[in-house]
Amino acid sequence: MARTISRMLPLGTGLPKFELAAVQVPGVTRSQDEELCDKGIISSSRLPVKPLLIMVICAHCPFVKHIEQALTDLERDYGKSVQMIAISSNSLVTHPQDGPQNLALQLKQNGWNFPYLLDKDQSLAKALQAACTPDFYLFSPNADGIQSLRYRGQLDNSRPGNDIPVSGNDLRAAIDSVLSGNNVSDDQKPSIGCNIKWDPGNEPDWFS
């Protein structure tokens, strides 16, 4: 794995449009998927008008595994007031272990109810300038319902092996500011994790 940091998409960037397939868990009814899906597809136009947290994750990355419980805790604490969505953008050509079956298993094992979308053509990852897993993007709607980026970067300072407990405090502080109507601090630190695995020939211009 290549240890990679976020590219830090400019604050104020609008939410990219997307239509992506939701990962289904066999035998499990997932309420948010039922509410948001149209024939298994979730589009940006169907999302509720409330803060939106997009989490770029995957099934195999050790940096993601390190924070899985923290994502469970985030959903418990903010899932009613913030629309959480996970996306997996890793190449299924080079990393089939991040395919729908393993993503479904990850959903089930962690008890996540938020939608998990398969960014198979990697278009949303490119639009977000996502560089690593995990990478976090918090959007918030204005009075007209238009979503703009308020926070991007790390969950907290914890990394596998650095002995700092996972707290989620950076992302939580940003969410709390958005929910209370306050400005989010501009002091935002990039996330660090495994690099996005791009399809051969589909690497963005800034990838190296």
Image (tube, rainbow, N blue to C red):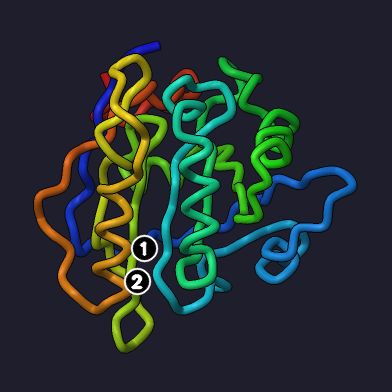
Residue 77 x, y percent position in the rendering: 48, 61
Q: Which residue is mark 2?
A: 147
Q: For the residue labelled by badge 2, is the local secondary structure a helix, a strand or a loop?
A: strand
CA gap, disc 2 to disc 1? 6 Å
**Position of residue 27 in the picture relative to residue 105 (left or right):** right
Residue shown at 34% from the left, 87% from the top: 144
Quadrant in which residue 138 is drawn: bottom left
- Give the amino acid at mark 1: Leu
Residue shown at 47% from the left, 20% from the top: 62
Up the image or down, 143 lies above or below 38; here it is below
Foreground residue, 169 or 58? 169
Residue shown at 65% from the left, 20% from the top: 96
Foreground residue, 100 or 62? 62
**Position of residue 8 in the picture relative to residue 176 (left or right):** left
Residue 33 x, y percent position in the rendering: 70, 61
Q: Quadrant of the N terminus?
A: top left
Q: For the residue labelled by badge 1, is the local secondary structure a helix, a strand or a loop?
A: loop
Foreground residue, 9 or 202? 9
Q: Few, some or many C-alpha atoms within 10 Å of disc 2 (few <14, some 14-19, many ≥20)?
A: many
Q: Few, some or many C-alpha atoms within 10 Å of disc 1 (few <14, some 14-19, many ≥20)?
A: many
Of marks 2 and 1, which one's residue comes earlier in the chain?
1
Residue 175 — which label?
none
Residue 56 x, y percent position in the rendering: 44, 41
